[in-house]
Image (cartoon, grey):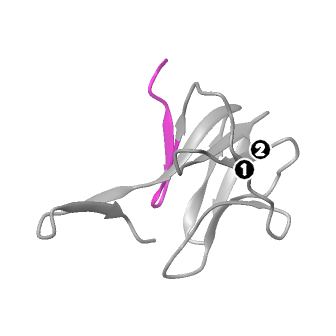
Amino acid sequence: MKNEYYQQGDVIIERVEVALSGKPVPPEGGRLILAKGEATGHAHAIEDIAGVALVNGPDGNLYLMLPGKRSVVHDEHKTIVIPAGLYRVRKVQEYDHFDKEARPVMD
């Protein structure tokens, strides 16, 4: 499989080849939220949710199944279009050399 991923701000959406399992994430306000910004409250979201599945995977990541291409929107970032497929959604990590630990980037 070709390494295929998309990034919008602090969110990475990476194509995977794993079975979709986990607890479904319910829509909020008619859209599926991939991540919420800690500083602004803005969200990375899919608004056209027909046929889209988003689940909390057993590994703590979100998994997204898109039956066709969909746009991911955010108030402060350019809209990106993701093709049909199965994806893992995760936050970009940064490494703090003073604390010697990795942590999610804050958006």
Asked if residue 39 lies left or right of residue 93, the reply is right
* Residue 8 within the magenta-colored segment of the rendering: yes
User: How crowded is the residue under tag 2: few (<14 C-alpha within 10 Å), some, or many (20+)?
Assistant: some
Label 2 element class: strand
**Is 43 located above or below residue 87 in the figure?**
below
Q: Residue at x 40, y 55 (%)?
A: 92
Q: Quadrant of residue 87?
A: top right
Q: Position of residue 79 (x, y in %)?
A: 62, 56
Q: Residue at x 52, y 45 (%)?
A: 59
Q: Quadrant of residue 84?
A: top right
Nearest to viewer (mark 2 / mark 1):
1
Closer to the chain start, of discs 2 and 1, is 1
Q: Which residues are magenta?
A: 1-13
Q: Residue furthest front?
A: 58
Q: Residue at x 69, y 37 (%)?
A: 21
Q: In the rendered structure, which amino acid carries the disc numbered 2?
A: Ala
Label 1 element class: strand
In this orientation, which residue lies closer to the viewer: 95 or 101?
101
User: How crowded is the residue under tag 1: few (<14 C-alpha within 10 Å), some, or many (20+)?
Assistant: few
Which residue lies under the disc numbered 2?
Answer: 53
Q: Quadrant of residue 73?
A: bottom right
* Residue 6 within the magenta-colored segment of the rendering: yes
Q: In the rendered structure, which amino acid carries the disc numbered 1?
A: Lys
Q: Residue at x 41, y 71 (%)?
A: 106
Q: Position of residue 94 (x, y in %)?
A: 29, 60
Q: Position of residue 57 (x, y in %)?
A: 61, 45
Q: Residue furthest top?
A: 1
Asked if residue 85 lies left or right of residue 14, the reply is right
Which residue lies under the disc numbered 1?
Answer: 23
